[in-house]
Each structure stands twice: as structure tokens, then as C-alpha cells.
Image: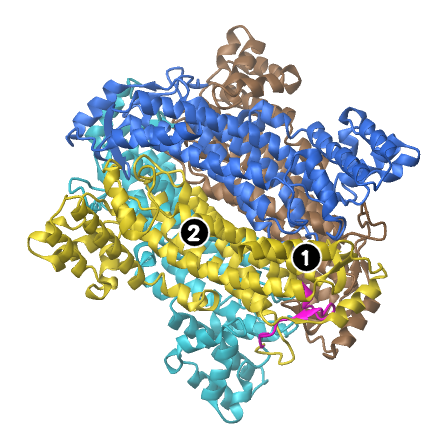
Chain colours: A yellow, B cyan, C brown, D blue
Amino acid sequence: MFERLFVPEELREGFSDGAWLQAMLDVERALAAAEARAGLIPEDAARAIAEACRADRFDPAAIGEAARSPGNPVEPLVRAVREAVGGDAAQYVHHNATSQDILDTASMLVARRAVGMILESLEGLCGECARLAEAHRATPMIGRTLLQQALPTTFGLKSAGWLLGVLEARELLLRIREERLAVQLGGPAGTTGSQLAKLLSEELGLAEPVAPWHTNRVRIAELGCALGIAAGAAAKIGLDIGLLSQNEVDEVSEAEGGASSAMPHKRNPIGSVLAVACARQAQAQAGVLLGSMVQEHERALGAWHAEWPALVGALSYAGGAADASLRAVTGLDVHQDRMRANLEASGLGSDVGSAEAHVDRALAAYREVA
Amino acid sequence: MFERLFVPEELREGFSDGAWLQAMLDVERALAAAEARAGLIPEDAARAIAEACRADRFDPAAIGEAARSPGNPVEPLVRAVREAVGGDAAQYVHHNATSQDILDTASMLVARRAVGMILESLEGLCGECARLAEAHRATPMIGRTLLQQALPTTFGLKSAGWLLGVLEARELLLRIREERLAVQLGGPAGTTGSQLAKLLSEELGLAEPVAPWHTNRVRIAELGCALGIAAGAAAKIGLDIGLLSQNEVDEVSEAEGGASSAMPHKRNPIGSVLAVACARQAQAQAGVLLGSMVQEHERALGAWHAEWPALVGALSYAGGAADASLRAVTGLDVHQDRMRANLEASGLGSDVGSAEAHVDRALAAYREVA
Amino acid sequence: MFERLFVPEELREGFSDGAWLQAMLDVERALAAAEARAGLIPEDAARAIAEACRADRFDPAAIGEAARSPGNPVEPLVRAVREAVGGDAAQYVHHNATSQDILDTASMLVARRAVGMILESLEGLCGECARLAEAHRATPMIGRTLLQQALPTTFGLKSAGWLLGVLEARELLLRIREERLAVQLGGPAGTTGSQLAKLLSEELGLAEPVAPWHTNRVRIAELGCALGIAAGAAAKIGLDIGLLSQNEVDEVSEAEGGASSAMPHKRNPIGSVLAVACARQAQAQAGVLLGSMVQEHERALGAWHAEWPALVGALSYAGGAADASLRAVTGLDVHQDRMRANLEASGLGSDVGSAEAHVDRALAAYREVA
Amino acid sequence: MFERLFVPEELREGFSDGAWLQAMLDVERALAAAEARAGLIPEDAARAIAEACRADRFDPAAIGEAARSPGNPVEPLVRAVREAVGGDAAQYVHHNATSQDILDTASMLVARRAVGMILESLEGLCGECARLAEAHRATPMIGRTLLQQALPTTFGLKSAGWLLGVLEARELLLRIREERLAVQLGGPAGTTGSQLAKLLSEELGLAEPVAPWHTNRVRIAELGCALGIAAGAAAKIGLDIGLLSQNEVDEVSEAEGGASSAMPHKRNPIGSVLAVACARQAQAQAGVLLGSMVQEHERALGAWHAEWPALVGALSYAGGAADASLRAVTGLDVHQDRMRANLEASGLGSDVGSAEAHVDRALAAYREVA
């Protein structure tokens, strides 16, 4: 019930049982194709395996249930795929691989899709912030430090600050998507050949790592941190909008304000609220991913398993934060008269210094990459 | 897919859309009954409302979807219940209450059920640890500090240490279940009368708070922390069993060891692995609940919303840790010969000091409360 | 530089090198006294050891430096004490104990003193909140949910909510101080006799545990969580005061507002700011203590060591939060006229419902324990 | 006492009161120089200010104490510098700046120095791991998954995995040092001119940001996360060495093993222990920095202040983890005979697959950047 409230539906679908199943099957299929190209298994076998690797041929609930015994879903899935393939080809399913190879590489596929969606939200958010920065480049308002009126600024500069935060977070995620989402292939002890990893990376369009990374989890932690940062940049916007929406301040209102069960007069800044809430969860999951870097030998006693829900959580709630923040800024009602009135009431003058020049620089930086 | 692996099915069901829906409906029903007793609404209306408050009459997905606009599921649920009740009685649905009253009180109902299941797992775990402590009261083994052989101890004392940790965690949860799971009733600004809260607490069998606790979240943080502590106590057992299961140590094996997709010879300590993994997630959620205590005015700008998935996560994964640890210890295969051999190889003698006396004290403490 | 800003001096002194040294020496002295009472060492030796166990006879910096090699300060301290005692008695220093016994028990002494100071701050905070609740029992103001004006309440009820949060946190800490700060005595593998632990607990006025708790860290995690909760309850007050101090709201000002380096017109809510900042650090340290529960065998490979700075941090910053929040509420300037004006501007009436009755109940609960 | 145990002395000195004071004075000096170059203040004034900006002319304790009232040390420092400068020039001290400009920019200077030292430790660690990888490229040992013997690998490949983790973490920190440590200059509301920021960045050798980043904290969170990742990569090594050092495994021992206060026979893996302990603290501080991204308006109500101890903690303990891990690997005693014996006892053959090829690739990647 709550995930539906926080996480956009399209993103959630990417973490469904079916989506995970398909991702794991995609890896088994690509592995067979790579092995055939390397001459390690017959081409016929690879074709038969490709044929079988369709999620709709398997029951995710049954596989999920069967996962409880070995402690991961790959073992029962491999058994099921072998059965589905049948004949001589069955023995070539999962050849040279271990459960972790499949699950880690499938995680990368799931993450790639989700990061793509999150990037879209972040880009939408950048666009809206840029629009506000441009439109309100010179709209004066009072700047506030420690929640006290400080000196004049412009709403454009505030929006430009939001823009730069999201832009920087986006750059982190972009770099990770391009360079750090890599195939994992090492077999049970990480000693499987790197030539096969190269072919597998070509099949799947993922990066090729220097070596198997089964217990070198820097890339997972990087991804988690970038998601926590993206959520934080989005939630900063939400917090500001929530504060500006206070009746006593009343400088903005969300276009699509939320209704209240008891108070029909209210127009709640729900996008802001959800962005702030999502960031807390996304950042906690980043913390789990950081902590889980400290893994035993060639596969951890729990820290690897701990990554799975944490990665899903970090992707879900970073996406939720970006989406909620986008909801908050889209069509944001900017009350310039109230900004002006609050500024005048502050008695702190009207000199906005270089606010407009800062806006221009921020917009230029944005346009360079947009 | 992963939740199924980590969280026992019965526990998961308690967090299903249907379960949440029913919990919220139970609160609306009990509220109407309390109001009728207080003479605030007609008895007929309370009866009509009770009639309508059955989860199978509503569509959780539709309510979950409709929750996105107001930012919580109560607002659409109240509309749906009003429609289901119809007529004059409809106006008495949700009377004097605000969304937070319903959701907070429903959370307490959901938590009570889940804590009950977790307590059962913890009690099972205590029972198994006590059994091991008693059976191996005098079974000598080497004690290890910083993973180095230190001085002799007994496997009974090790098990008694596990027992005491779980026992102490259980006591925390018991106290919270008895004293701290309370109704929340305050209306939009926390000013609704306390007489009604008393009646509502009687209807639901929850504690009556001194005053509305809409933004005094100590009890939620206490619950989260107790769950994190329970998970930690369970995972300590898992870690020890995982370490003792190392082939080179080989002093125990889990009865129901996990299979491997690539290595049929392995008997993995999967209960241990899952306990350790679950604790990381449960404790991260405890951290979210702690952080979310700092709430704005009479309802927070996001920190309240952040509690919902965190509470579900803390309950789920504390239960998962207890369950996994119980799986690990149940029928644990204790290799006394290997314990003796490792002890002898250490050359550190065989004096186990007061180990047996410590075991006796631990078992006495256990029997006092079991 | 920053600790001085966040942590009250008296509290900081309790974590100085000298204070830690004295706490460890107090444990060695008490251990010798207990052993003499048990007839395990000569009374003369105990007297000689007591004579030597004065912090001013040792160089904390030298001992701290020498701690790097064994990884804890007890080993070099014991060597230094033996040298200071000299003669036959030297052999009875640290008799039957291991480093962890001394350090864990010393931590309990350090924690007891710090918790005492924190409780004083919390009690001061309760007193101030109670004073505000009583004085403003009926002072009307607008209640705010999601930062939007909702329905009328009273400033007394808001203060009563603060009071109850702090009161509940105080109760947790009180219980821990009375029941959970216990001696640790187990020797290298936790097998040292419990009779000695009983005598040691009498010497030091700490609780006697059921058995050695070297890797059963529930009590440490409980303490950490209670500190995180206390900090959260204090920071809730700070956040509210910060929000009410906004120029546009202007319903309160801190008596001792902070100056600004650039803007002499500002009166910053510094107590509030510091309370919010401290809570983040205290709660993060609670998280470290939770995570560190999962310890290997009879002494952990790092998780025990991780507790030391975390416990100091949790105590320091919980104390800092309580102190800062006390600074914020003491002499708080309550602008009743602005409360009234904001309420009127809201157009939401003036019915404060049962606010006054809630205040009375909160004050009664407070008086019962004050 | 504990910081001395965990954090290398040279690193600690970089966070002393004197070091912070000098960093803030360096910023005031550079600001005056930049303003003189821009023609905003007389050159004479800049020279007089430069003269005064020497830490030994001020009392850090007094400034720290005076910081409690305004809530930051810049305000009393500026007063003290103005007094030290005297005459007409005094008015040009802190011209166009606000406290946050000085403190944020000083933080960047402090961080740059500390990151430099941490990078040195990480580079030392890479060198030692590379040495081990090369020397033991083909030294066979058993690979372990879930702490169970799995398939053969080589100690060189294990070391190469350590190397790659540290190398990746180092790259993150390098990039941050080059691109993300930037001057902050915005004045009270972030509207101070960007031309001045450019000049200031030239004076200090820090990056020039697109715009003031007073409440866009992405760069701080990035730094915190990179430190948490570096600590995690270092602690992974520590955990492995601790596990391999178990008496029953006995495949390595630290050269400089720690002594025990009670058990002279022990040779504790203290470097490993400390690395694991430090990582927990560094990663918790990264979490505080992530959470503190969500800042109010133009300066946060506490979240900015929360960054100060968190940044110091993250730098300190990441450095501590790198240093401890370096201590663990330096001169590591590798027991090839025991590796061989454990491998043979496993009965899992001796085929190390492509282990050596993976080592070569890792070493090539290292040499490219070393």
C-alpha cells in the first residue's frame, strides 16, 4: 500500500518478481550465447537455452518459495531452466557460472532500467527548475538563513540552486550508468576466465570489469550513494517548497495540492512531503549498501544478501523522491506579490546583488549538458 | 522476490494491502463504537459503520492509487466507507478523527500482530538456545577473541550467551507490546477529547496514552529500536554459527543446510546468512524511525510518512532475523569431537572455569520468564 | 573546536583522557578489593593497588599512544599499574580479568556519570516545558499540519507534547541507569566466576549481570537507542521553536538569540539549531551501536572497538541536544499577540477543543514523576 | 584516548583547533587579497589583514567558547581579527562574506589536506596489495563462499581483489579532490558576485563553483560517500585478514600482531580489527552527511552545523581505516604451506582457472594509474 504511494508504478514494475526473473533469464541466455561464441558450448544448446529463457514460462512465486532453502533464487531457477531446456542442451545451462554471477549481473540489468527512469525524472526536474530560474531570474524575495530573514535574493536564484544540485546528482548517476554497471562473471571462486566476461558484457551492453567483483562492492556502494545523493537533492527542493507554502509565508503553492480527510480548506504540499519522506528511506538504504561492502572472502556471510532489498529500496525511493519533487515543482504557483510583500516587510532593502548573474551561470551549465 | 526469501509468509501477510485496509477499517469501526458509547453519534450509525468496515468490500489497489493525491490512504478510504455506509449514517464515519489518528492507530494494530509473531520466533529461539545450553553445559570448546583462540569455554556457555541476548531483546518487545502500543486520537490539531481516546483504547485493546502523540514519536522510535535490537541479538547467533561452520573449524552444521547452484558438495549455513542479512535491514529501518522523531508542529512535513515503510521494514526484517536464526539453531548438529580436537590443538588446557555456573544462572533467568 | 560548540563542558570532561584513565583505574582498584574480600588475593595487595590507582600517577597520552600496538589502552595501563604497585603485590593487579572486563566496566562508569548529567538536562527541559504548558494552557494559537494551518490549539498543548516526549525519553534513560549499567567480568573467554562479579558490582555500585556480557551487547544498544531517542525528543522542540521563530510567523523568540557575523539585525534561534544538529550525530552513533551488536564469538573483530567512539558520541551529542534545547526554551519569549493574530488570520475559528484537558493530564503525569 | 587509537596523529593534527583556526584565517586572508585584486578594498588593507591572519595570534579555546553564543566560530574570529588589524583596515575584514562562506571554504582546505593524507595511505595500501598479488599470483589456496570452502583460487587473486577495491575508491577521492573541493562565496543570501569567487579560488587553489553552494550540499555528500567507500574497501581487507588469521585457518599473520593483557600467547590481528572498527564510524558519518543534504532555504536550521563533526569524523575514520589496513598488510606473513594444506584437505582439486590472468589484468590496471 505504501510503496504504491511513494514509488512510481513504472519503476515498481521493474522490481516485480517477473522483472527479476526475466533479468536473471536474460543473463543465463546471454551467458549461453557468449559461451557458444567462445566455442565452449554448442550453438544449438545456446539456441535452446535462449528459447527457454522467457519469464512467462516460469512461476516466480514457486521460484521465490524454493529460494528459501538455498538462500537465493538462482539455484531453483537454474533447475527449472534445465528442465525447460531438456535433452543434451540442459547441461549447458548456467555453464561456468555461479549463483552470484547471475544475480549480480541481473541486478545490473534491473538497476540500468531503473536508473534510466530515475534519470528521466531528474531531467524533468532540471527542466522545471531551469524554467523557474529563467522566469524568475529577477523576481525578488527575501533570502532566509536559519529560517530568519537575511538579505534579498531572487526566486530565480533559489531555483537555480535547486537546479545545480539535481544536475550534479544526475551527472553522478550518468557516469555510473555508463561506466560502473558491469557484468559479474567469476564462477564459484572468482576464477572463471575474463574472455567470457568480455563476451557476456557485449551480449548485455554492460561494462566489462577488470576482474570479477564478487566481494569488491565499490560499484554497488557508489550506485547506492549516488541514489542517496539524488534523493537528497530532490528533497531539498521539497523542503523549500513546503516551507514557502506555509500560510504565513505563502510564496508558492503546489499546482496539485493534496486534499485532507478532515479539513477541506487545506491545500497540502504533498509532492514536497513525499520527496522528503522518500529521501530518508533512500539514504538509509545507501547506508546499508555502504555497510555491506565489508564482505567475507569470495562471498559474504549475509552482507551480499543484504544488498538485494537495499538496492531495490535505494532505486525505488530515489525514484520516488525525484518523482515527488517533480510533482511539486511542475506548474508551481509562484506568488510574486507575496514574495514582494514579505521582502518589504523585512525592511532589508531590495539589492539582490549578483543573483541574476548566478542564475545565468547556472542556466549556462545546464544548457551545456541538457 | 527477495521479501519472500527474508520474511516469513505469515508475517508478510500482516503487511499486505488487505491487512492494512482491515486495520484502518477496524479503527474506523471502533471509533464509531466509541462515539456511540459516548453519545456522540447514534448507535444505529455505529452499527451501519461496523457493517461496512470489512476489507473485502473495498479495493486496496484503487485506494492505494487514490492515496497518491492526498498523500495517504485514509482520505480515499473514508470516502469509500462513507459511500458504502450511505444514508444519514455516512456523516458519522471518521467523526472527530483525522487521517493520522486512523493510520497511527492502525499501525499499532498491525504492529501488535507482527510483534506477536516476532515474539513467538524469539521464544522459539530462546527455547532452542536453552536446550543447547543445557545439553552442552559442560561440552568443552575453545573460546575465541578477535577470532584467535583464547581460553577454554563450553558450548553451553556460548549458547547461554545467545539465550540471554535474545531474552533481553524479548523483554524489551514484551514491555512495548504491553505498555506502548497505544491508540492515537487527537483530530486535526491534537485537541480531540481524551475521554474518546479512553473508549477507543478499550474497543481496540490498545493502551491509552496520556495525550495525543501525533508528533511525539518516542513510542515509535522505541519500537523500532527494540526491533533493531532483537534483530541484532538474533544475528549474533547467526554470525557465530556461520563461523563455527567453517570447514576448518567444523564445530557445528545447520540441520537444514542450503544447496549451491554450482557446488553440490556444499552445505551452506543459510539460516545464519539470512539472519545476518536481515539484521542490517532491520537496523537501518530503526535508524529511519529514530531520525523521523524530529517532526514539525502538529504533523510532520515528510517524517511521518517516512515512518510507514520503515515500520513495516523493521517489523519484517526483525521477524526475518529471528526466524532465520531459529532455522539455524533448530536441530543444530554439534560436533563435540571437533570441539574437543580444536581445543586440544590449541594447547590452552581444559579449565572451563565457572562456565557451568554461568549456564545455570542463565537457564534460571530463562525459566523465570519462560 | 566543534565539540566545544555542541557538547557542554562538564559532559566533555567526563570523556577526557584523564576521566577514562580514572574510570579504568577505579575498576582495577575495585577488582582488587573484590578479590581480597573473596580471599583470592592478599588484603595488603589490594591496599597497595588502591594506592596506585590514581590517574594523576599516569600519563594518559603515553598510555593512549601505547594502546595502538595491542589495540586497547588496558594492556599498557596494566603494565604501568603493575610497575607503580611494585613488589609482590604487582602480580595481583588485573587478576582474573581481561582487557574487555576493565574497559566495558569503565565504560559503564563513564556512562553513568554522563547519563546523570544528561538526565539533569532532560529534567531541566521537562521543568521548562511544564512551566510553558501551565502558563500557556489556554493561550490560543493555530495548529499546523504539513506546515499548513489546520485547527486551533494552545501553546500550552504544544509545550505539553514536548514535555511528554522528553519525559518518556527520560524514563528510558532512568531505567537503563538503574538496571542496565552492569559490571562486566568474565576473563578472556567469559568463564570467570560470577561470585566475583557480584562483589565487583557491590564495590562499584553497578548492576550485577546474569552472566558475562562480553558479546551480548543488548545493554549497550539499549543505552545507545535511549540516547538517540532523548536527542530526538529534544530536537523536536528545537525544530518547532525554529519554525515558530520565523519572522513571518514570529510566535516565539529564544531569550538568548545568536548574533550573526554579517547581519546585526538577526536574532538566530541558536539553541534550536544546535539541538537539531546534535540529534543527527547522536542518532547516527546509536546506529553504530545497533550495528555493532553482531559480534564474533567471545570478542568481536572490530565491532567491540567500534563501540567506544560511538558510545562517547552518543552520550556527548544526546547531552548536547538536551542542553541546546534547554537553552532554547529557557526564558522563551512567547508572543501571544502574534499567536492570536496568526490564528485570526487563518479564519479557522477559536475552538481549542480539549487542549486544556490534555495539558492537565500531561502535567499530572509529569508531577507524578518529577 | 580512543581517537588516538584509531586516527593517525598527522591526520588528527589537521583537525586540531589550531588547524581549523588557521584554515579560517587563510580564507579571510585570501578573501582580502581577492578583494584587493578586484579593487573592492585598498591593497594596504589586504596587506594588514594578511599580517593579522596567523593562528598563533589568537586563542582557539577562547574563540571556541565564544562560538557557543552565535553558534559558529566565525563570528568571534572576525571580531578578533578586526581588533588585531585595527585602524581603517579593520572594516575590510570579512568584507562581502558571511560566516558560512568562511567556514565552508575552510572546510575545503581542511578536507584537501586530510584527503591528501588518506590518498597516501590508500596508495600505500594499493602498493602492498599489488606486491602481494604479484608475489602470490600463483599461490594456490581454497576460495571460500559463505565461509564454506568452494573452489581453488590463488592468494594473488584475493590480493588483486583487495587492490581493485582500494584503487576504485582512490579514484573517487582523487576526482573529488581535483574537481569538487571548491570555494564557497555568496554572502548572507548567496548573492555575492561570482567574479570574486573566481579570484578567491585562484588565491586558494580550490575549484570555482558554478554558483554559491550554501544549501546545495552535493559536493559534501559526495566527499562523505567517497570516504565511506574508501573505508569499506579498506575494511574488506581487514575482515579477510582477520578470518585468514584464525588459528584453525592460519594462512596469514599480521607482521605486527597485537599483544593481549591476559594471554601472552596471542598474536592479534589488530590492524584488521581497527580497520573494521573505523569503517563503521566513517560510514555512519557518511550517512549523517547524506541526511544533512536536505537543508532549509539559504542556510539550514541545524543540518549545516551537523556537517562539521560528521566531516571531521568521516575524514578521521576513513583515514584510520586506510592506515589500519595498511598496517595489516604491510609485511603480512603468508603461510603458503597452510594454504596448500587447507586446499588439499578440502579435496576440491587444484584448478585455479584464470586466477593468474585476472591478477595480471588487475596489476595492469594498477600500473596504469600508479
Residue identifier under label 1? A359
The amino acid on which the numbered mark 2 sits, given as a three-letter code, is: Ala
With respect to residue A314, does B45 lie above or below? below
Left or right, residue B129 beside residue A126: left
User: Which of the pair B315/D56 is nearer the observer?
Assistant: D56
Q: Residue A251 in magenta?
A: yes
How far, Cα to Cα, is label 2 from label 1? 43 Å
* Residue B12 sits in quarter: bottom left
Q: What residue appears at the point 56 percent right and 14 percent down from the top-left corner?
A: C81
The secondary structure that most of the magenta stretch takes on is: loop
* SS at badge 1: helix
Q: Which chain carries label 2?
A: B
Q: Residue B294 in magenta?
A: no
What's the mark number on residue C343? none
Q: What stretch is highlighted in magenta?
A: A242-259
With respect to residue B148, does C122 lie above or below? below
Q: What is the quadrant of the C terminus of chain D in the image?
A: top left
* Residue C318 sits in quarter: top right
* SS at badge 2: helix
Residue C88 horizontal/vertical position (percent): 51, 7
Left or right, residue B25 beside residue C128: left
Residue C30 horizontal/vertical position (percent): 55, 24
With respect to residue B251, does D334 lie above or below? above
Is residue B327 visible to us here? no
With respect to residue D98, does B222 lie above or below? below
Left or right, residue A220 beside residue C31: left
Packing grade of label 1 (10 A; few <14, some 14-19, many >=20) is many
What's the mark number on residue B282? 2
* Image depth: mark 2 or mark 1 in front: 1
Residue D71 horizontal/vertical position (percent): 75, 44
The amino acid on which the numbered mark 1 sits, given as a three-letter code, is: Val
